[in-house]
Amino acid sequence: MKRIAIVVPLLFSMLFLNGCGSGQTNEATNIDGKNQNVRKVVIGYIPTWKNMRKTIDDTDLNILTHINLSFLNPDASGAFLLNGEPICSDGASADIKYVVKKAHDKGVKVLVSLGGGTIPQCSGDWKALLQDFKRSTVVKNLKGLVDFYNLDGIDVDIEGGLLNAISEAGDYTPFIQELRAVLNPLGKLVTCATASYVGGMIPKSSIPFFDYINIMAYDNNWKSTENHATYDHAVRDMELWLSLGCPADKLVLGVPFYGYSGLVGSGGVSYKSIVEQDANAAQSDVYKDNKYNGIPTMQAKTEYAFKYGAGIMIWEISQDASGDLSLLQAIGKQLK
């Protein structure tokens, strides 16, 4: 989910105008882009490699509406399961089922995320698997995955150069369209994560087939010492997608529960570890060499996202602090 991004050339945004159709949406959206009447979502990613049970046990599920378990990938045949265990994931089936049950008991939906910023070696070749003569096998196996774990949908987090290659081959949108055709009649969701730079954006033709589009408004200013996720970055990215004609009730603003010490892209540090050094750091976006989002910025972003979009997405939940220092609690206060 942490995207590998270098540039955000907004001058090219007009290339996508008139192509970002609304398709099916969750609620009606006002003409001016304000999105006041839609139930807001709070989507939290939980990595499969970071002790999923502990993460969900430590998380206030009264605030989250959705959990995305990241990541699962297929093998070379397009299969996701072998003998009841995920083929290419750091998580075990018992842990996934634990998260699903605990979340469902609190009315929280659970999806699994495909791909990731770096595709693991255990994964099959997504570009080959999504060609038209193999795609239906992948979709069939994803439906089986949803059924096996009692999931609420699939989140597609294919990013960067791989996304661009699949899109240029003409295989991304047909995959999403076919996946939606299978899952939507079952009441299941199809969502995605996308960057906001040319070459890292989902193709405009895929927009109508997603329920939610998570905008990765972080990891900006790549290889610089600037803050990677300012409020202005968030507004810019949301305004870009809205200007492309994408419906506000699908747009979810992604926020980071981490920062960087030094250059963006190296020296990543969790928000939790920053405020453990000094609780006052929660009220700022800078502590020593660390640049991140503190509580005031997180509240401002949440207010903006709730007003102009569908809600907030978090990468990722295990990096949060607890109690009064919690960023999730700061987000939750905006729901009241």
Image: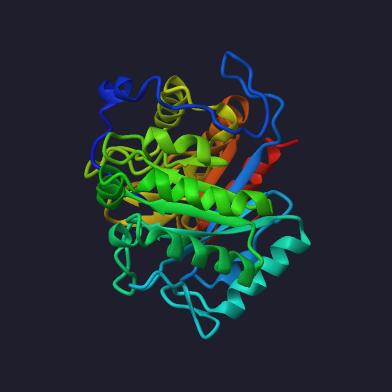
In the visual, does 68 lie left or right of 333?
Answer: left
The chosen color scheme is rainbow
Asked whether the viewer can see residue 114, the reply is yes
Q: Position of residue 330 (x, y in %)?
A: 63, 42
- Above or below: residue 86 compared with residue 156: below
Residue furthest top in the image: 32
Q: Residue at x 32, y 24 (%)?
A: 13
Left or right of 129 in this view: 149: right
Query: Which part of the image, by quadrant, shows the C terminus?
Result: top right
* Depth check, front residue: 24 or 108: 24
Q: Could you say where residue 113 lies in the image, as x and y percent from the top left?
A: 49, 58
Look at the picture and state if 263 lies above or below 104.
above
Q: Is residue 321 visible?
A: no
Q: Quadrant of residue 52?
A: bottom right
- Seen from the viewer's position, the closer of residues 236 and 139 is 139
Q: Position of residue 85 (x, y in %)?
A: 52, 81
Residue 315 in percent (x, y) is at 48, 51
Which residue does the image show at 40% across and 69% down from the upper left?
A: 78
Furthest toward the front, the residue is: 133
> What residue appears at the point 59 percent right and 48 percent down from the top-left corner?
43
Q: How many marks?
A: 0
Q: Is residue 132 left or right of residue 137?
A: left
- Residue drawn at point x = 47 percent, y = 22 percent: 245
* Quarter where residue 249 is shown: top right
